[in-house]
Image: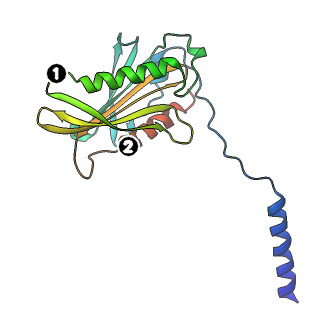
């Protein structure tokens, strides 16, 4: 009898579960707007997937803003996050990759990387993706090539968050296994941007 009562309760529970509405994945809240690149840059973490935050320097090109340097111990991998004032009103720049300013800057960044800083520094795109996959803030390209005789790998990402235009880059000598994880670096940067000021 006790077993029958237990089965009846379990059966009722299953019916209740079938009648409940399906769960809905919640999108993260928009990143709060920063009125200046410097203010958004303050949210960047001191450490991101083994990359330590370094100096912050002002930029004038390709847009006014700041660049925050990152590197792993021993500088085996290096990167940066640039927070740039958009060509439009920050309040009018939505988070993500859809704005024309983001798409234009992404194409410019890829062309600049492929051209290189000289005839012995060339990179080619091997993969493109949106990151994070579930709610993209960045359009990214993974690149491979050489700096002189050194094979290298790099990841370049461009997006918009908090009313500012962002460029991110992580580069390192090509090794197997890799010296660092650029996608994890990007994930930690995104998490830092989501922290309320």
Residue 158 visible, this angle: yes
Q: Nearer the viewer, mark 2 or mark 1?
A: 1
Residue 55: x, y in percent?
31, 24
Dot 2, crowdedness within 10 Å: few (<14), some or many (≥20)? Answer: some
- Residue shown at the point (11%, 36%) measured from the top left: 149
Dot 1, crowdedness within 10 Å: few (<14), some or many (≥20)? Answer: few
Where residue 49 sits, quadrant-wise, is top left
Where residue 155 sits, quadrant-wise, is top left
- Nearer to the camera, 193 or 149: 149
State which tag comes first along the sequence, 2 or 1.
Answer: 2
Residue 193: x, y in percent?
51, 31
Q: Quadrant of the N terminus?
A: bottom right
Q: Is residue 110 left or right of residue 73?
A: right
Q: Is residue 173 left or right of residue 186?
A: left
- Residue shown at the point (40%, 42%) measured from the top left: 183
Q: Which residue is mark 1?
A: 118
Residue 77 visible, this angle: no
- Residue shown at the point (62%, 37%) measured from the top left: 28
SS of the residue under disc 1: loop
Residue 166: x, y in percent?
44, 24
Where residue 168 sits, quadrant-wise, is top left
**Quick check: marks 2 and 1 in contact, CB under 8 Å?**
no
Q: How is the image coloured?
A: rainbow
- Residue shown at the point (80%, 53%) measured from the top left: 21
- Nearer to the camera, 183 or 47: 183
Instruction: Give the spatial CA distance, label 2 vs label 1.
Output: 30 Å
SS of the residue under disc 2: loop
Residue 147: x, y in percent?
16, 32
Relative to residue 118, is residue 143 depicted above or below?
A: below
Q: Quadrant of the C terminus?
A: top right
Q: Which mark is residue 49?
A: 2
Q: Is residue 148 left or right of residue 89?
A: left
């Amino acid at each position: 009898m006790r077993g029958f009562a237990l089965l009846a309760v379990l059966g009722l529970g299953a019916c209740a579960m079938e009648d409940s509405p399906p769960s809905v994945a919640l999108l993260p809240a928009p990143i709060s707007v920063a009125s200046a690149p410097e203010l958004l840059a303050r949210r960047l973490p001191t450490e991101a997937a083994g990359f330590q935050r370094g100096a912050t320097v002002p930029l004038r090109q390709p847009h006014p803003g700041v660049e925050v340097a990152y590197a792993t111990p021993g500088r085996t991998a290096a990167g940066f996050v640039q927070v740039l004032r958009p060509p439009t009103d920050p309040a009018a720049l939505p988070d993500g990759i859809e704005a024309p300013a983001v798409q234009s800057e992404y194409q410019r960044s890829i062309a600049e990387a492929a051209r290189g800083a000289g005839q012995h520094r060339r990179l080619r795109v091997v993969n493109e993706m949106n990151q994070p996959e579930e709610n993209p803030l960045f359009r990214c390209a993974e690149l491979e090539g050489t700096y002189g005789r050194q094979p290298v790998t790099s990841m370049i990402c461009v997006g918009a968050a908090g009313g500012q235009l962002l460029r991110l880059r992580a580069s390192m000598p090509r090794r197997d296994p890799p010296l660092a994880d650029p996608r994890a670096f990007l994930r930690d940067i995104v998490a830092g941007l989501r922290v309320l000021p």
